[in-house]
Image (cartoon, helix red, strand yellow):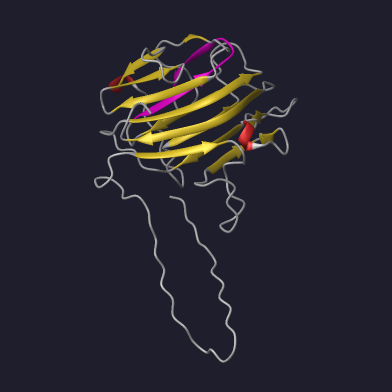
Amino acid sequence: GIDYFKTLNFNTIGSITEFSFGLSVSAAWVDPNESRWKVFYVADSLPDRVSLQDLRSEPDWRVLGTGGGTATIAPPGCTPVTSSCKLQIVSNTPGSLAKDTLMYYRSDSLRASKHGYITATMTASGLTAGASPGVFLGLKDPAKLVQLGISGTLTGFTDSSGAFVGTPVATNLARVTWRVAKFGTDSAAIYSPADSAKSIVSMTYASLPTAPPRVVYDRFFFFGNITQTALSTATSVWTNVNYEIGAYIP
């Protein structure tokens, strides 16, 4: 679902009037030729492209945003080799009466029968207490949504409107690593730390909320902020986001 093009320039000298050239392209084969497909995002630049000629991260992510949310790389001029770079997403400027969403997503297709996971290193602040999550991370297949939501007091699975489903747990803001995993059509779970063998929340596949319908592009893997109530704010700071199709653990 992501389109690219690359401009090629050729210069000739002397009396040359024509020439020929070849173009070779190399890429991983999609399923069933490849059983696993992995994507990395390191937050040393904004995920979305400026234009087809100017990609800020490779591969790039599409962005969905309304209501004044902002995204910046902090600190300005950060040095990637020192791991100081972070993507900061701020929802709703103070005093705004409108809800706001700022989400980055990718359209790599995840079938219902396939395993999949998305991981992130992230801290959050300014979250509203109660059943109004301000930060989310997740994936979906054509039938079900597997979305982690975090509010000031609760953490758990949410539906496409942002409401908690199942049995959320108490939010622990000391958690900074996350993994949201889907085990085919069997179940789904949320882990923190991301490499932990024991989930903090789990749900059977049949109990997961229905996946939202496609709007222009499918959003199979995604992360960002969502403000559920007026006058509330949420800030999330992301170091990296990675996902994989065909596996439930890195």
Q: Is residue 30 above or below residue 188?
A: below
Q: In the rendered structure, which segment of residues is drawn in magenta? A: 144-158
Image quadrant assignment for residue 38: top left
Q: Is residue 118 left or right of residue 11?
A: left
Q: In this view, does 177 lie above or below 23?
A: above
Q: Main SS type for the magenta part?
A: strand
User: Which residue shows up at 37% across the image and 19% down it?
Assistant: 189
Question: Residue 241, position in %: x, y?
Answer: 50, 32
Residue 101 seen: yes
Q: Hey, which residue is sitting farthest top in the picture?
A: 170
Question: Residue 15, position in %: x, y?
Answer: 56, 92
Q: Is residue 12 left or right of residue 186?
A: right
Question: Residue 149, position in %: x, y?
Answer: 50, 21
Q: Is residue 11 above or below residue 72?
A: below
Image quadrant assignment for residue 230: top right
Residue 68 seen: no
Image quadrant assignment for residue 235: top right
User: Which residue shows up at 52% across the image and 63% down it?
Assistant: 6
Q: Hey, which residue is sitting farthest bottom in the picture?
A: 15
Nearer to me, 100 or 86: 86
- How many labels, in total? 0
Question: Residue 104, position in %: x, y?
Answer: 54, 38
Q: Does the magenta stretch include residue 183?
A: no
In the picture, which quadrant includes the C terminus? top left
